Image (cartoon, rainbow, N blue to C red):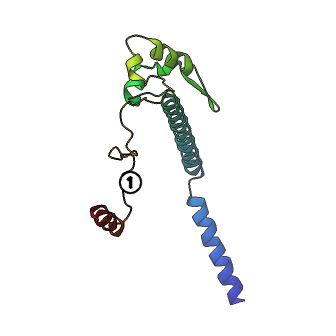
């Protein structure tokens, strides 16, 4: 019987404690936290989208052989560029204008597929060879050939 009375007294104390809690205050706190979480998620999504756009622009500039990506990126109108999944809309036209424009084409490497044509001696050829005078491969062969020629 004492245990039951003790349990009832404990429950009564818990009920009194619950009555003191401000339900409206808790609801307001929950709503405030939900709004903060929503704002943080929107901020994160916006930053992630901007990072994806920046990376796509840099990748396209590298593909266009830009010498200085930061300088070329400053010339682009980033407001007109949109990211649609993996595709970047409006970027190709701007890069084409920059590569063809007289005032900005120096920012890109010239497209040359030809290998340079060097003229002169080839480094792998030996120029001191004369017919009939073959060079020896080892020191012993060179000494042997030297003394044979004096005989």
The image quadrant where one finds the N terminus is: bottom right
In this image, 56 relative to 132: left or right?
right
Residue 58: x and y in percent read 48, 32
- Please say if 84 is above or below 1: above
Front-most of residues 54 and 117 = 117
Instruction: In the rendered view, tell whether residue 139 sits above or below residue 107.
Output: below
x then y, percent, for residue 45: 56, 38
Residue found at the far front of this picture: 151
Location of residue 5 in the rendering, given as x and y in whole percent from the top left corner: 68, 83
Residue lying farthest to the top in this orientation: 102
Residue depicted at 57% across the width and 24% down the height: 82
Looking at the image, residue 41 sits to the left or right of residue 142; the answer is: right
Q: Quadrant of residue 150?
A: bottom left
For the residue pair 79 and 70, the one nearer the viewer reads as: 70
Q: Is residue 19 above or below residue 96?
A: below
Asked where in the image residue 118 lies, by quadrant, the reply is: top left
Q: How busy is the neighbourhood of tag 1: few (under 14 within 10 Å), some, or many (20 plus)?
A: few
- In the visual, does 110 lie left or right of 15? left
- Check disc 1 and report its element: helix, strand or loop: loop
Which residue in the structure is indicated by mark 1?
A: 134
Comparing 74 with 35, the one in front is: 74
């Amino acid at each position: 019987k004492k245990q039951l009375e003790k349990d009832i007294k404990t429950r009564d104390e818990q009920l009194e404690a619950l009555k003191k809690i401000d339900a409206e205050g808790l609801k307001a706190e929950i709503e405030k936290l939900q709004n903060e979480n929503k704002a943080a998620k929107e901020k994160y999504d916006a930053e992630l989208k901007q990072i994806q756009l920046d990376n796509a622009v840099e990748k396209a500039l590298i593909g266009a052989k830009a010498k200085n990506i930061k300088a070329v990126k400053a010339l682009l109108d980033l407001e007109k560029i949109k990211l649609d999944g993996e595709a970047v809309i409006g970027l190709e036209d701007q890069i084409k204008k920059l590569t063809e424009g007289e005032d900005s084409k120096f920012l890109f490497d010239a497209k040359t597929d030809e290998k340079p044509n060097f003229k002169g001696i080839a480094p792998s050829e030996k120029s001191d060879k004369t017919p009939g005078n073959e060079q020896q491969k080892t020191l012993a062969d060179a000494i042997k050939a030297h003394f044979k020629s004096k005989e």
